[in-house]
Amino acid sequence: MTGFDTVVVVDWSARSAPSPARPVADAIWIGIARNGGPAEARYFRTRAAAEADLVALFEAERAEGRRVLAGFDFPFGYPRGFARAVTGSDDPFALWAWLADAVEDGPDNGNNRWDVARTLNGLFPGTGPFWGCPAGEADAVLPARGTERDGHGMPERRRAEADLPRAQPCWKLYTTGSVGSQALLGLPVLQRLRSRFGAELTVPPFEAAGNGIVLAEVFPSLIAGAVAARTGADEIKDRAQVRVLAEALAALPSDALDAMLAEGDTEEGWILGLGHEAALIEAAGAQPTLAPPPLRDDCFALPAGVEWTPVDTALATLRDRLSPVVAASKVPLAEAAGRVLAADLHALRPNPPEANTAVDGYGFAAEAGQGEEIVLPLVEGRAAAGRPLGRAVPAGHAVRVLTGAALPEGVDTVVLDEDTRADATRVAFRGPVKPRANTRRAGEDVQTGACVLPGGRVLTPADLALAAASGHGALPVRDRLRVAVLSTGDEILEPGEPVAPGQIHDANRPMLLALADRWGHAGLDLGRVPDDRNELRARFDRAADEAHVIVTSGGASAGDEDHVSALLKEAGAMQDWRIALKPGRPLALGLWKGVPVFGLPGNPVAAFVCALIFARPAFARLAGAEWTAPQGFDVPAAFEKRKKPGRREYLRARIREGRAEVFPSEGSGRVSGLSWAEGLVELPDGALTVTQGDPVRYLPFSSFGL
Ligand code: AMP
Ligand code: MG
């Protein structure tokens, strides 16, 4: 985040009449981002209205002691020597003052800019530097075309524009991107803002940026790809542009923005962020963080009047009622594997970025490959990946190309090395060669703005490749879900601790912490709690402070020593989860101080199965990920079983020789069976008789993210 509380971006207009009442592109748009939040966009029909709004905005912000950065999309200065020729001084502010005196601009946008341009041209020898005006306005002093000028001695472009062919020269007053007129009609406004706000307002790089209002020249085209990616379907581009650039500037790290504000040319001015496009585009992709709303009190309520709720009903409840509870932030792409993507990701650039060759060979224009026995003269040099030829290939010529090389101008078809004979000056091959053979079109994989990855996805290694190829260097991901794990029971000891008769080692807590870890969450070990209501209450309080979700094992039934369920009941947000499922006794689900609690059974087999079936998808939702059902497949049974109706059963299973075998004992205390197993066989809710070879549903542990 920058050191600016408010970032304003202004898309200026040189119109001579008010813009239409219904918002259009060719008008003044002002984007305003406060405190790094989403920007609002305001529409103005006249420069006078926009100026009044800016004054009011700046005054209000300053009254609250807030620091403001305001960007305007027209040149703040002119090529070297111009200010001196007009004012006798190299000081750009002297020129601003001169323009503020000379320019008249009415409340309805009526203005004298052609006359001012004529006056300025008159100060130069030959035909002065300004050009471009409607036919009726053109004369010997103010020509209609740039080519009609000569002898004025001014450079065409500023240093800032040397590598920006898309930027229009400030001398051009009319038609496409008439920044010349925008500057003539904009600089007087900036000059009035300077007079009004005095030392509180600074304009880098003409002077060092201060702590109050900072004005800077901006060029939204620097982040055109990011704007395209974030322009709503029916949104006017100019509106999206001010909004996205304001958010991007606000999202930049403050030292990066300070460094950008310090750069540039103190006489000609500078475009903020020039040369740092990647950082700006990066910042433009940063989604403002929204604190997720809390869960509803009834989020775990199951249908009333049902004694044993079917597994699918319970899962549907979790899917529909749970929502993300973690905020989002950006992380470097290389650290994003396994994290949950916080928002749809759009391509910032096409893949491939330009047409290129898929093979090593020779490139030429398709027509040259239409004969039978073809011999083409070779142009000198070659095109390789990252090393373009740099010039056009004339018709009827061919050029050496290597895999991944951008196709030079004049080349759209490539013949494979193996199909050619070549010497130093010619290449021979058999035609006809299919037009565009062995080439890849620009954007054939991904086009700029396309949604490449949906929000809610857990990022895979392949996703990182796709995101990188689409121009991203950092990705918006959800903060990790903090999962507090605690065990309950007087009989439970730490693993390895010496035991007295009747005591057992805690098997659940290491297992549940490891599951949380495998699922990409941050496990928080909250230890063991004896069967004591007050101690448990204190531990729950601590867990609710430190974690997003609490998982307990043991004490979840309705017995005397089942304090988890008792406490949640006391808090008034407890649901007895009597699920028609084996293994698994009732679960206790509820909210403790707004934090969801999953009270799992104490028995390790039941705790494990219930964690896989219920906690895994529920935690994924809380973590901002999509809901996913485990993927299973039908395999022949290597066992026999008779099952009564009423409960879904999960058997510890594994596949050997293509058949599903199950652990010989269904005893739910048999922890060894969990390690033996490589998956679960899921038997449906109804009655069933399984005989050897019957198809049964097998869910490998890998489907549960293990
Ligand atoms: P409970 O749900 O508290 O009645 O516990 C059911 C069974 O699971 C009892 O035999 C407990 O001793 C056992 N159990 C509870 N917690 C754990 C644990 N963390 N590790 C191993 N066994 C446990
Ligand atoms: Mg217990």
Image: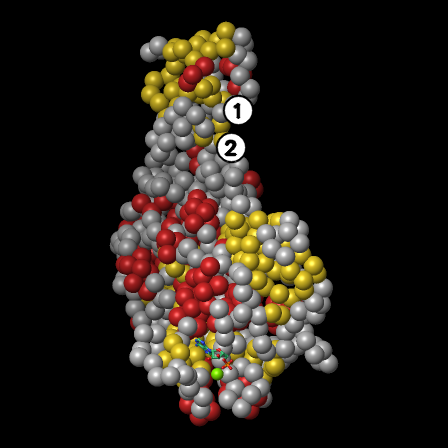
Amino acid bearing label 1:
Arg
- Position of 29 with respect to 35 (left or right) is right
Q: Earlier in the sequence, mark 1 or mark 2?
A: 1
- Position of 479 with respect to 81 (left or right) is right
Amino acid bearing label 2:
Arg
Residue closer to the observer: 255 or 95: 255
Query: Disc 2 on helix, strand or loop?
Result: loop
Q: How many marks?
A: 2
Residue 70 visible in the displayed image: no
Pointer 1: what residue? 436
Residue closer to the observer: 98 or 676: 676
Q: Is residue 38 above or below residue 450?
A: below
Q: Residues within 10 Å of mark 1 (few under 14, many from 20)?
A: some
Question: Residue 416 location in percent, x, y?
Answer: 45, 19
Residue at figure coordinates x 37%, y 31% from the top left: 385
Residues at marks 1 and 2 touching, judged by CB atoms closer than 8 Å: yes
Query: Disc 1 on helix, strand or loop?
Result: loop
Pointer 2: what residue? 441
Residue at figure coordinates x 53%, y 12% from the top left: 431
